[in-house]
Amino acid sequence: MKRRVYLPALCLLLAAAPAGATKLDLFSDVEVSAVNYQHLPYGNTLRSQALYTENAQLGFVIKNIKLEKVPEATMDVGIVLQSIGTGASSNTVSGNPQFADASARLPHSDGTPYVRNAYVKIYKFMRPNITATFGRQDFTLGQGITLSGSDLGLPGGRLEMAELYHNIKGDLFFFRPFSGDRYIKVYGGTAYYPASEGLWQAYHFWEADDTAGGQDILFNTASKTKKFTGLRYVLTQSQLSFDGEAVVQRGSAKLAAGGTGKYEAHAFMLKGAWTQDISFFGKSKVRLGYGRSSGNPGTGSSTDKAFFPAFGSKYNGLERKGYGAIAGASLYDMVKTSSTLNGLPYGMSGLNIINIGADLPYKKMIVSADLYKFRASKNSSGGTLQIASEFDLKATYAFGDNLSVNAVYAIFTPLGAYPSSKQAKLISGAVAARF
């Protein structure tokens, strides 16, 4: 199916390529994985799932197209097709709550290709220092805590402005991503300041749902607008790296039952790594991470204090991605362990995440070990805050820059928030190729 769809599209693009274009970039990315989840907690039950997935991309970009009436400007036109699906040997994932949300957000989850990116990028747009991108495009804001296109891209427009003031760079963006059965307006801006020893980034954007609203962590809304203000600092040196980001969430909502509510929440994530030569292994890395988001202490308030953006980075194909191979935690939700919006046990909101990990190379293989601890910020029922711990062991073997294989073994240990303490386990293997 992929060849029947991809190759005609490629031929049409090549036929339509303007004579003034100087370069055609082609790229592909294929990941094939086999995964077995055992004893995933969900309410009072334990669920298992065997999963075989294929995640493929094919992209082509015509670059440096000359614009006759604006000779100093040039244009790129890009299209990226993506295909995500399961093999015939897997049980359906749409009926499994751990994978239903990831599947439902995709245009197709049966391997049928869809358009991930379709954009026009114009250099020297109106001014020499402005680059404009219009259409469905990949975009991640900061660490991706609040905004990311993931596998879908973000439809809209973006202006990148160099040298706004000295060496400060700025972006303005407006997107209309799809969520559930409606579009949501996302618009704002970000500024970058390269200091002598690191990069500062500040941003502010609005996430406006004017049409239907829906269930939030605390409210059932008719409409809502959330505002996110963030600050990030990134430092990269020969041995030390640091990435810290803090976000404040504010806003207001019209409640479905009448009246109004407001949002007052916050989150932060601090990540650091130290690289050093170790005898036998060679150049190794130790990682530390700590993050926290706020939660709701009760249910009767008119103020929602649970941090919860709609489009943060948290999916990779049909699975979660994030902190922990099983948990796939973001700063505010994780793999579904209940029917709640954030996947946490009932009454819990906000997350505290601690991560200690190491990468140890051996010849062409890298062995990675990570320990995670998950704790809720608040429990409205007044019970325990302890959620789970997880240990991940991963081995990656690179055959070169374009081909690698990896194997993962993970153990997820439920703590006091769950009725059963039986460990969930994950065994997976994957092959990734690109050119």
Image: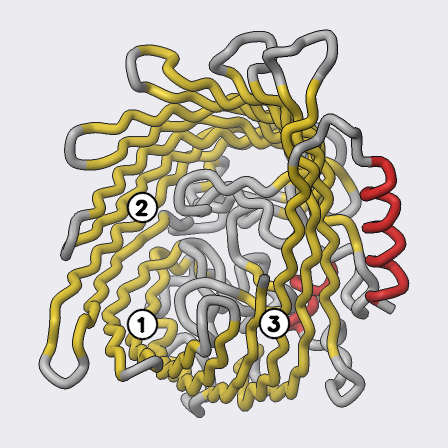
Mark 2 / mark 3, whichever is N-terminal: 3
Q: Amino acid at mark 3?
A: Glu
Residue 1 visible in the displayed image: yes
Mark 1 / mark 3, whichever is N-terminal: 3
**In the figure, is residue 153 to the left or right of 211?**
left
Q: Nearer the viewer, residue 72 or 114?
A: 72
The residue beneath circle 3 is: 31
Image quadrant in which you'd find residue 200:
top left
Asked whether the residues under the numbered discs 2 and 1 touch, taking CB atoms below 8 Å apart as contact, a structural biologist would say: no
Give the number of the disc on residue 372.
1
Q: Residue at x 41, y 88 (%)?
A: 421
Image spot of residue 246 (x, y percent): 31, 40
The residue beneath circle 2 is: 268
Q: Amino acid at mark 2?
A: Phe
**In the figure, is residue 271 to the left or right of 109?**
left
Label 1 crowding class (10 Å Cα cut-off): few <14, some 14-19, many 20+?
many
Q: Amino acid at mark 1?
A: Tyr
Can you tell which of label 1 and label 3 is closer to the viewer? 3
